[in-house]
């Protein structure tokens, strides 16, 4: 079977599987997020932490709950790393340095899971299991909870209540993420993934195990995917390591797991607002953007100009030969379109334009389909912007799902989309202004791309990296940690503010002039607004980096 044929079958089977899972997974999520009865375990947790499961919260209280939970999580994870040498199962490893402990704590609590270190030589089993793995679940649950609050803002009328964060958090972890992780873990073990507490290797063993890497996958700083919720893992080689991702079948399963929840959430949205067509419209936009990215990245990696790529038929440097170019490119598109951060190939070795596509995926705001929850609420904010633009074009007050989009709502939406570009571009500029470009292994446009990619990944809470950047220094750990914090929690506050504003409104009845937000016209407009917003914001930076190098 040829490379292109195998790649097409890989992509087509993924699309089919996601389409089959869309309705049952989305319907199940809507039932989880619409609590009527609580299990005995859930009631026990509520009593333990002093939560009134029947009491709902205003958007301000909901936001404070998110921030308080996340702040405590950062402090606990930081303390766990700093005290590692005094804890059992530390493997004799020393305490993590203060700046690295800060960066890692922020990284995992914000669902970024960026790693500036090699997991197997820095973190003991206790920190990995009781600290990082726990955050793999709860930080993803926070994103889904915030998305649920925004959906309730659209669905409810004349109220200041958006649900209860603590109830949402517990139910999402217990009813969604833990079951998915359990089933996914069993499937991956059946596929050959090692399940072993003593599977750690030293750098020599690690290098030997990656002898199949064409061009070498050197000391990548990316996070390893944790069953589709996000990255962060034990092996420095990430999903190219044969212990973590041994076959093409497990590679397919990992891509499916990281996409299935984000792609099912639009169905949840449609069910909760009482109109399935709205969910189909949102998932159609996500699908168009995702398929376009996958096709572009495959094309650029399989048919790139240059003597060596043309001689071998594709850009194969940094690609694991067990997967090949097409499966690697599809994995790269999926991981940068979501907030996963796992990689099975070396993004720094991608073609200039191919690397630019991975950056563009993150710059879109990771909305196709995006992270667990964050992709849906990002796309819904874009939908608000789109109906506002449509209203201006026809001279009509903008409405979305019967809710008027006025000055207050647009302020929340506009600020949402200003935060991340400011974080990314100011961070990149600060790195050059303070002479930190020496951390890049390359000069010129590619060196700029390495630094731009790092702040794009941190600001958008993705966690992947070009890996051609030495960032384990106090300045980089601090700067990227700040970028991760701002890129996660400022948008969350703005989303919850928007949700509160929408929930307080009395819906306006649809009329003949109401924009039908479930029709292809709206889908096309939303795709256009998403791309144009990114192009206008990031085009100058992309022109100086991957576009300049590629042209």
Image (spheres, helix red, strand yellow):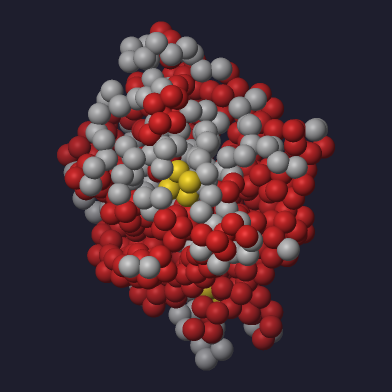
Q: In this view, does 118 lie to the left or right of 191?
A: right
Residue shown at 35% from the left, 25% from the top:
200
Q: Hey, which residue is sitting farthest top in the picture? A: 86
Residue shown at 65% from the left, 83% from the top:
396
Quarter of the image with the C terminus in it? bottom right
Residue shown at 52% from the left, 36% from the top:
218
Is residue 287 in view from this perspective? yes
Viewer-side residue, 147 vs 166: 147
Quarter of the image with the N terminus in it? bottom left
Viewer-side residue, 219 vs 129: 219
Residue 253 placed where, x, y %? 30, 54
Q: In this view, does 383 lie above or below 504?
A: below
Viewer-side residue, 548 vs 188: 548
Residue 270 placed where, x, y %? 37, 70
Q: In this view, does 343 lie to the left or right of 128?
A: right
Residue shown at 51% from the left, 40% from the top:
216
Residue 421 placed where, x, y %? 68, 52
Viewer-side residue, 351 vs 186: 351
Q: Hey, which residue is sitting farthest right in the picture? A: 433
Total labels drawn:
0
Q: Hey, which residue is sitting farthest left in the picture? A: 40
Is residue 537 in view from this perspective? no
Residue 185 placed where, x, y %? 25, 43
């Amino acid at each position: 079977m040829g490379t292109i044929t195998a790649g097409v079958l890989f992509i087509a089977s993924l699309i089919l599987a996601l389409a089959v899972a869309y309705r049952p997974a989305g319907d199940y999520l809507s039932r989880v997020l619409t609590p009527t009865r609580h299990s005995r375990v859930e009631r026990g947790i509520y009593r333990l932490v002093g939560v009134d499961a029947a009491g709902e919260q205003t958007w301000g209280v909901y936001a404070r709950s998110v921030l308080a939970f996340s702040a405590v999580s950062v402090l606990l994870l930081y303390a766990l790393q700093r005290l590692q040498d005094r804890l059992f199962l530390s493997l004799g490893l020393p305490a993590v340095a203060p700046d690295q402990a800060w960066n890692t704590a922020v990284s995992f609590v914000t669902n970024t899971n960026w790693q500036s270190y090699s997991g197997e030589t820095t973190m003991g089993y206790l920190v990995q299991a009781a600290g990082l793995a726990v955050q793999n679940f709860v930080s993803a649950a926070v994103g889904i909870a915030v998305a649920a609050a925004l959906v309730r803002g659209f669905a409810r009328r004349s109220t200041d209540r958006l649900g209860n964060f603590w109830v949402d958090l517990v139910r999402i972890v217990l009813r969604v993420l833990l079951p998915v992780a359990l089933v996914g873990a069993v499937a991956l073990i059946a596929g050959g993934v090692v399940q072993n507490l003593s599977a750690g290797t030293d750098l020599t063993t690690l290098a030997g195990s990656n002898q199949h890497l064409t061009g070498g996958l050197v000391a990548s700083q990316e996070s390893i995917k944790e069953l589709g919720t996000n990255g962060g893992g034990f092996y420095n080689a990430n999903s190219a390591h044969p212990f973590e991702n041994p076959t093409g079948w497990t590679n397919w399963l990992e891509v499916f797991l990281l996409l299935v929840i984000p792609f099912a959430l639009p169905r949840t949205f449609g069910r909760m607002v009482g109109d399935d067509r709205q969910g189909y419209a949102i998932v159609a936009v996500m699908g168009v953007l995702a398929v376009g990215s996958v096709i572009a990245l495959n094309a650029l990696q399989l048919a790139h100009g240059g003597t060596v790529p043309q001689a071998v038929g594709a850009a194969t440097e940094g690609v694991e030969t067990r997967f090949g170019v097409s499966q690697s490119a599809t994995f790269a598109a999926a991981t940068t379109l979501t907030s996963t951060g796992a990689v099975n190939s070396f993004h720094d070795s991608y073609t200039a334009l191919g690397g630019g596509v991975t950056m563009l995926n993150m710059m879109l705001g990771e909305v196709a389909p995006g992270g667990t929850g964050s992709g849906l609420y990002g796309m819904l904010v874009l939908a608000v912007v789109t109906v506002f633009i449509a209203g201006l074009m026809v001279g009509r007050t903008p409405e979305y799902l019967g809710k008027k989009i006025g000055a207050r709502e647009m302020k929340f939406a506009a600020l949402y989309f200003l935060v991340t570009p400011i974080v990314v571009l100011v961070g990149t500029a600060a790195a050059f202004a303070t002479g930190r470009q020496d951390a890049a292994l390359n000069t010129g446009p590619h060196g700029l791309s390495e630094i731009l990619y790092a702040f794009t990944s941190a600001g958008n809470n993705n966690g992947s990296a070009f890996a051609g950047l030495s960032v384990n220094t106090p300045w980089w750990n601090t700067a990227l940690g700040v970028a991760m914090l701002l890129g996660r929690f400022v948008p969350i506050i703005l989303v919850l503010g928007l949700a509160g504003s929408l929930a307080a409104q009395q819906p306006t009845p649809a009329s003949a002039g109401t924009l039908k937000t479930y029709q292809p016209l709206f889908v096309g407009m939303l795709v256009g607004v998403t791309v144009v917003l990114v192009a206008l914001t990031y085009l100058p930076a992309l022109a100086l980096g991957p576009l300049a190098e590629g042209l």
